[in-house]
Image (cartoon, grey):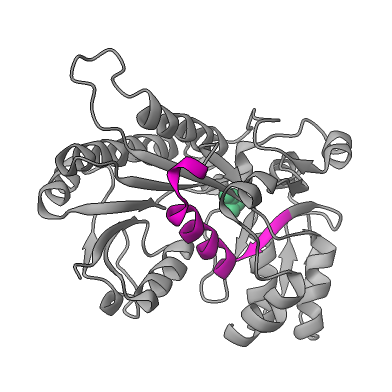
């Protein structure tokens, strides 16, 4: 049987590592990996092709369209929330124009194939903004359609690209006589993700994974958020699981374009205590950075993922105990 071709942008990033490894293990897919950075040597043999290049390079994307019959796109490439604040316009170009280029590629592929290409897009808790700590505590689990006035460029970019995906799926060229085959855009809003094999770069939920990786390497770590600062988290195998479950879900079951997923919610001190349980010599202190703290304070303390559970059978395999004892610590 001919294997299905999957395009992964941002392939060398944190989610890319997990997703490529998983797809290769399944064996039913040919992965085309795209990243501005070179791809880890361990991942290269798992891919049909690796292309080092920029999602803003429309010539490059044009060549991809004619060379491959791509059935699914995982558009993971993005500038994360902290890094985006240092150069918001560049972040906008990559996060929004880059996504638009990929959506365009998906349209062309869908027209050519005569059926909608699946476009799987990771969004984030950064799409939300709680106005103050009292509200954040009082609200608890946030649903998909509330508190959508993000304070970061990254959050604005994610929220807007969710809308673009919905537009390309339901309303693209709605006035044209030759109304074209739409794409099939599906989006997940992730909590802070924690991987055992990679360290995040440029995010604001990074204090969690950074505590863990520093302790594992016997390096001191000053957390840039307060002890009581709380957001939801998820271990990377569950992030990959959610992407694959959403990809496989029958279209008619999906009532929404955008779904929250989550696993466990921890304060920074609870996170530290879990790390110290396995790395008792870890040296983790708290030296809050007021500005990065304010960003994390604006993100929900927890997410309501009941829609994903209902529509496509989502549930995490790794609660906090299992994340540390069976995934993070053994693999780190
Ligand atoms: N982990 C991301 C960040 O911190 C949020 O999606 O930017």
Q: Is residue 13 above or below residue 122?
A: below
Report if residue 89 is visible in the image. Answer: no
The front one of 242 and 164 is 242
Nearer to me, 54 or 158: 158
Residue 241 lies in magenta, yes or no? yes
Q: Is residue 148 above or below residue 137?
A: above
> Which quadrant of the view contains residue 44?
bottom left
Q: Against 271, is 307 above or below?
A: above
The residue at 12%/49% (across/down) is 63
Q: Which of these two is toward me, 297 or 220?
A: 297
For residue 201, above or below residue 137: below
Residue 22 in magenta?
Answer: no
Q: Position of residue 158 (x, y in %)?
A: 51, 38
Give the quarter of the image for residue 36: bottom left
Residue 99, located in which quarter of the rendered image? top left
Q: Residue at x 78, y 47 (%)?
A: 301
Question: Where does the N terminus fall, quadrant-wise?
Answer: bottom left
Q: Total number of numbered labels?
A: 0
Side of 253 relative to 27 (left or right): right
Which residue is drawn at the image coordinates 82% and 54% (left, top)? Answer: 226
Residue 294 visible within the image: yes
Highlighted range, magenta: 232-253
Residue at position x 53%, y 64% in the image: 241
Residue 64, percent from left and from top: 16, 51
């Amino acid at each position: 049987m001919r294997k299905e071709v999957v395009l992964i942008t941002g392939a060398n990033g944190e989610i890319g590592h997990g997703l490529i490894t998983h797809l290769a293990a399944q064996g039913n897919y040919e992965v085309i990996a795209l990243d501005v950075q070179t791809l880890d040597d361990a991942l290269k043999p798992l891919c049909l092709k690796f292309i080092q290049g920029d999602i803003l390079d429309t010539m490059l994307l044009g060549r991809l369209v004619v060379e491959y019959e791509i059935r699914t796109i995982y558009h993971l490439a993005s500038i994360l929330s902290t890094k985006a604040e240092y150069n918001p316009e560049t972040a906008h170009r990559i996060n929004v124009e880059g996504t638009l280029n990929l959506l365009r590629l998906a349209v062309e592929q869908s027209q050519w194939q005569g059926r909608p290409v699946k476009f799987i897009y990771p969004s984030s808790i950064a799409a939300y903004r709680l106005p103050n700590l009292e509200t954040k505590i009082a609200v608890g689990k946030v649903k998909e359609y509330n508190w959508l006035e993000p304070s970061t460029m990254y959050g604005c970019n994610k929220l807007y690209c969710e809308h673009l995906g919905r537009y390309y799926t339901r309303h693209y060229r709605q006035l044209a006589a030759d109304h074209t085959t739409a794409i099939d855009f599906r989006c997940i809003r992730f909590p802070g993700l924690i991987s055992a094999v990679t360290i995040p770069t440029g995010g604001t939920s990074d204090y969690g994974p950074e505590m863990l990786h520093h302790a594992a390497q016997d390096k001191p770590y000053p957390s840039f958020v307060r002890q009581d600062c709380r957001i939801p988290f998820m271990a990377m195998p569950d992030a990959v699981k959610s992407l694959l479950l959403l990809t496989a879900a029958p279209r008619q079951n999906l009532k929404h374009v955008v779904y929250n997923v989550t696993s466990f919610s921890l304060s920074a001190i609870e996170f530290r205590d879990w790390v110290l349980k396995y790395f008792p010599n870890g040296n983790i202190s708290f030296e809050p950075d007021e500005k990065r703290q304010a960003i994390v304070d604006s993100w929900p303390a927890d997410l309501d993922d009941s829609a994903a559970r209902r529509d496509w059978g989502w549930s995490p395999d790794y609660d906090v105990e299992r994340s540390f004892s069976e995934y993070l610590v053994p693999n780190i």
